[in-house]
Amino acid sequence: MTALLEPPTTKPLVPHVIELEITGECQLVCEHCFADSGPAGTHGVMTQADWFGVIDQATEIGIATVQLIGGEPTTFPGWAGLVDHALSRGRKVEIFSNLYHVSAKGWAVFEHPGVSLATSYYSVNAGEHDKVTKTIGSHERTRANIVEAIRRGIPIRAGIVGVHDGQLERLAVNELHSLGIERVTLDYARGVGRSTKSVPDVSALCGNCGRGRLAIMPDGSVSPCVLGRFLKPANVRESSLASILAGPEWAAVVATIPERAEPCGPNGGPCSPSDQGVCGPGYTMGGCPPNDSNDCSPANTEACGPSY
Ligand code: SF4
């Protein structure tokens, strides 16, 4: 009797971050916004109960971190409940907020153990920052809330995006380091959302999309990351997350995204000692290896590049 051979099984790579884009609403109208968000944006069709279900599925799969993003995620009425739910499932939570307005309740949620913040910042110069956000006074408010988050001991990282000439974005990196934020990334506007009038393609992506992360949009569609939103092979309102990640459509989409050859450094180049002023001790760009962990340290030279 001949033993039946089991068909080969492919085990999908488990992402370590799931980005939940819970709203398209935002108080700001940034020039480069990947999500084309603004005050007229909506929360989409996903309800709080739908998002609870996504968090439960992410937990079953083993995704360690739930990120709430938008738009401005704190404009979604049930955002604090989503944080509680993810924490109750043993997930870490990162809230990617513009920190334009933080209510007393918001600060209380941010201070929960297991919660961290990420924010965007554009310049040391208030006028240059406000030129990007197209909102006068946004620099003052965001900077003050960054300082307050640090004062409260809330873990926080920042992403700086270069959008226009003369923005002084590199000085902003130094400024945030001096305020006490170790994890500061510098990137430049990518060809998605309001940054481009042409059809976006995978050349605009950092290469980690779909490999260490995935994103769920306000309509339930699943994308390799929020920047790769033009790739939507499935929808969580129609299929389970596990079946989507194990399916051929997902694998085919991820395979179209070129993996990054040079992992870290300004403009996608290597992060050399001469870049320390920009890179800082915890430098990453768009989340560098290993495993997109924001941990490009001397101990990780193999993953981060020999010149790190
Ligand atoms: S703060 Fe973020 S979501 Fe809001 S408009 Fe600016 S880039 Fe878009």
Image (tube, helix red, strand yellow):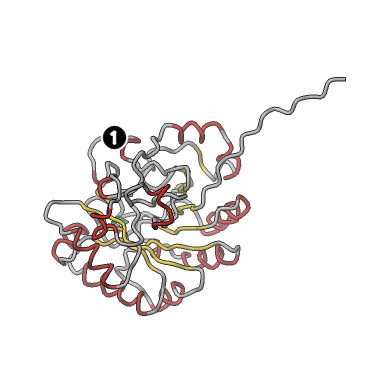
Residue 138 on image: x %, y %: 22, 67
Q: Is residue 193 left or right of residue 54?
A: left
Instruction: Name the quadrant containing residue 244.
Output: top right
Q: Is residue 250 above or below residue 188?
A: above
Considering only vertical position in the picture, is 144 above or below 25? below
Residue 39 visible at all? no
Residue 197 percent location from the top left of the image? 22, 39
Q: Residue at x 51, y 56 (%)?
A: 47
Q: Position of residue 280 (x, y in %)?
A: 30, 61
Residue type at numbered disc 1: Val
236 or 290: nearer the viewer: 290
- The quarter holding residue 170 reads bottom left
Decide: is 139 above or below 208: below
Instruction: Give the image quarter of residue 154.
Output: bottom left
Give the residue pinned by disc 1. 199
Residue beneath the point at 56% across and 64% down: 85
Quadrant into which the N terminus falls: top right
286 and 38: which one is in front? Answer: 286
Tally of numbered discs? 1
From the top left corner, tell me how far across and down residue 93 is, in percent: 49, 63
For disc 1, the neighbor class at 10 Å (few under 14, some 14 to 19, many from 20) is few
Q: Residue at x 75, y 25 (%)?
A: 5
Q: Is mark 1 within 8 Å of ligand 1?
A: no
Q: In the picture shown, does residue 144 fall above or below 282?
A: below
- SS assignment at label 1: loop
> Image point 46% across, 64% down: which residue?
79
